[in-house]
Image (cartoon, helix red, strand yellow):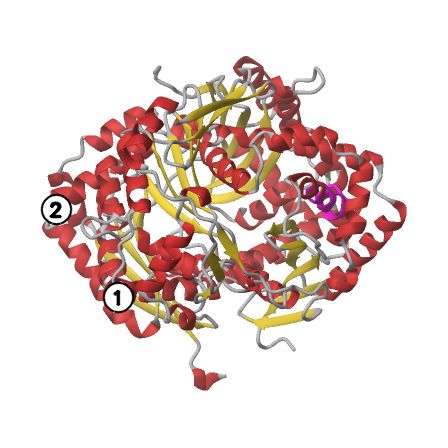
Amino acid sequence: MTNIKEIKNDLLKDSYFEIDHQSGFKIFVYPKENYSSSYAVFGTKYGSIDTCFKLQGNEKFTEVPEGIAHFLEHKLFESEELDAFARYAKTGASANAYTSFDKTCYLFSCTDNFEDSLEILLDFVSNPYFTEQTVQKEQGIIGQEIRMYEDEPGWESLFVLLRAMYHEHPVRIDIAGTVESISHITADLLYECYNTFYNPANMALAVAGNVTVEQVLKIADKMLKPKESKEIERKFCKEPANVVENFAMKNLSVAMPIFAIGFKEDIKTPLRTLKESMESNILLDIIAGPTSSLYEEMLNDNLINTTFDTEYFEGYGYSAHIFNGESADYEKVRERINQEITKLMETGVDEESFQRIKKKHYGSLIMDFDSVDSISNSLIGAYFNGEGLFDQLKLLESITIEDVNRRLKDAFNIENSSMSVIKNKEEK
Amino acid sequence: MNKKSYAEVSKGVKLLCVNSDKFKTNCIKVDFYLPISEYFPAQNVLASFMGHTSKNYSSVKAFNSKVEGMYDACFDTTVSTIGEKVRIRFSMEILDDKFSIDENSISEEAVDFLIDILENPNATENGFDEGFTAREIRFTLENLEAMKNDKRAYAVSRLRELMCKDEPYGIDNKKLEEGVRNLDSKQLLDAYNNMLQTATVVITACGSINGKMITEKFKAFADKIENRSPAILETIFVTKADEIKYFKEEMDVNQAKLVIGLRAGMEDANDNYFAYRVMTDIFGGGPYSRLFLNVREKMSLCYYCGARLIREKGIILIQSGIEEENYEKALSEILNQLDIMKKGEFTDEDLNSSIIALCDAFKGVEDSPVAVCNFYSSQEFDEEIVSGEEFAKRIGAVTREQVIECANRVTVDTVYLLKGEDENND
């Protein structure tokens, strides 16, 4: 039996459909009136942090090489006959995929032949085909992808920071693994990961744009066969509250040192609530956003430039508030940020800043609903976190200045912070 | 769909408003087009300056609070070169008026803000504000230097410099940095006045925004500028490379970056554009392209290998990231694939895949206000302005013979490799 529920939002005057499909898969359809294009994402809650797991009922945990989720993403495009890209070439859709810390998503966008493209998407993700020979071929390509990232200082600075903050949690490993780790990947291991994580209970399909529920169901009914939903147990070693080291550095050729400062949150449960992450984003804007006094002071004192940015970084078992940018005097930047946080902990956040930032977040939340790719990806992300797509809009109003002040005290501890710096070899 | 065109609202100031009520945002882009000239270093600083401070919002906090206060408007200023035209762009993405919490019109406030920024820079009659000038010179220099952080972009910019060193397009980055370093606040004011007086201004808006309101406000703004005389905008098209130039440079990189510059053989930006577009796409566009299927998939030499057409200059750029030891192998396969294009040995499937993918993409171009603005504003200097649908039709009409003809007009100009430093030099 397929169940369909419509979820409306009065402010946006939009609605989407949440479908419990007979196959066991969750499907979301967000029609956009007068749009020509559509965007579909088929995702699994399986990312680079899932390195040790077992199916419920099995005795032993399986430990797999770093980077295997990403490797699997690459290999799934292949099949015994035509690979997925060759099939999409006949429909005209633009297809891609990505692997993050906690999910793998396969997607396409198109204006014509939507149904044919959706059929390809559901088909190739449901039918793995790996051989030792094709695995070997991919090691060369992914090896070059890894080497490409090694030349991107912003990316490197994030991972140097994560390794400085986390002792055990696999968020500290590179999403694509290393040239060495992927050399241990075999076809059998890929099948084992696939059979564990690619099952209805762990996956969802989201489509937005010029589509109807009927169109999506027509293809889903044909392509998605009932499959056993499996319960997965993920093993995470206990992560201490403190950081590995307060400071870490790596040499790469850069014009000016690139830094990232992370405040590791001591978490008692693996996941933050949606409200907590919204509070965190408001807080980061208040502490060092473009309208904060700290931001202006640091610009005027030649400590930062306009690349300075903040990010709330969280997922299963990790949570950190990150400040990053370029600076010749990164130690001073760190000192200023620490001072500001200490000050705000004492005085609390001021009402005017709080209201201004809330209005900003109201605007940016709504603005995201123009884009079919942002809608589809957010639908998947929200579902995997146990949330609804419109929850943020509803929650924003309820967030108070007291909430934000409490979050500041809960989530920030200067003792548990790290700084990563990427700089030139010559600079000592 | 009605045929669209830019209306001249004042001398050399053209405006197009694409109305649609399907969006939750509006987008406005104000583009000032100028020739590449001695003002270029100052123009780089000018865009940054005007994006961070103005007479009425001089401090960072005041300026950013105004922007954030418009429900997190995305306001941005950029400088780029489109062929041999400099484009100074002021762009804004804003929430639609229907979501305003009070009765205020967000779009009108945004247009007023844009015009205020343009009319009232943080300057006196003697020059731009000294303190902010120094700060903005620092930002611009750091930004130019930071190009080295992005090794792929750096390699492309070096190729451009080397390949086009005798054309205005081959911007010498060292000279540019030098020019920026030596600027003063008076020169910034000169560059500002030069921009207002000599630029061709192209304004594009999309959303439910009131076209009459924008037209009236920008007309009033432009009519006030004295002695406006838009400069002639031309780009040199070199149609043929006489011989292949090879360059290898060293940097502290892990992976070598290969960039190849081709002369497309176009006489101008409208010369067989649609056929060139299809040809470049079959050669190195999507995952169905010859470069992707052979250099990446068959030979496992790289993660990325693609080609793109720079229409406004008649150049095709090929980019790939490889191990240095595979340089000869990759280069020879890329050139082999170009040869296959010239001989017409690509399949009908290659041609169809490319046409169907390009058509699909262009038909969807009107699904975001930003994409609409970018799509139409990029056509302002073309023979005529066509919709996404019409664009797709013209791509669809391209024949195999036209593609082969275009490929045969292509010549290899410059091969550039950015490679790791020799171990012995450490």
Whether the residues at callouts 2 and 1 have beta carbons within 8 Å, the answer is no
As shown in the figure, which amino acid type bears the numbered disc 1? Glu
Asked where in the image residue B338 lies, by quadrant, the reply is bottom left
Magenta span includes B305: no
The image quadrant where one finds the C terminus of chain A is bottom right
Q: Secondary structure at mark 2?
A: loop
Nearest the eye: A46 or A341: A46
**Residue B333 visible in image:** yes
A181 versus A316 height, above or below? below
Residue furthest toward the bottom?
A: B424
- What secondary structure do most residues of the magenta stretch adopt? helix
Give the residue pinned by disc 1. A132
* Viewer-closest of A98 and B7: A98
The N terminus of chain A lies in quadrant = top left
Asked if residue A282 is among those painted magenta in the image, a careful observer would answer: yes
The type of residue carrying mark 2 is: Thr
A397 is higher (above) or lower (below) than B414: above
Could one spot residue B120 in this view of the protein?
no
Residue B101: percent from left, percent from top = 70, 20
Name the chain letter of the residue that bears numbered label 2. B
Q: Position of residue B138 (x, y in %)?
A: 66, 55
Q: Which label belongs to residue B39? A: none
Q: CA distance from mark 2 to mark 1?
A: 30 Å
- Residue at numbered disc 2: B347
Q: Is residue A233 left or right of residue A267?
A: left
Q: Quadrant of residue A160?
A: bottom right
Judging from the image, mark 1 belongs to the subunit labelled A
The answer to whether A263 is drawn above or below residue B133 in the figure is: below
Residues drawn in magenta: A280-292
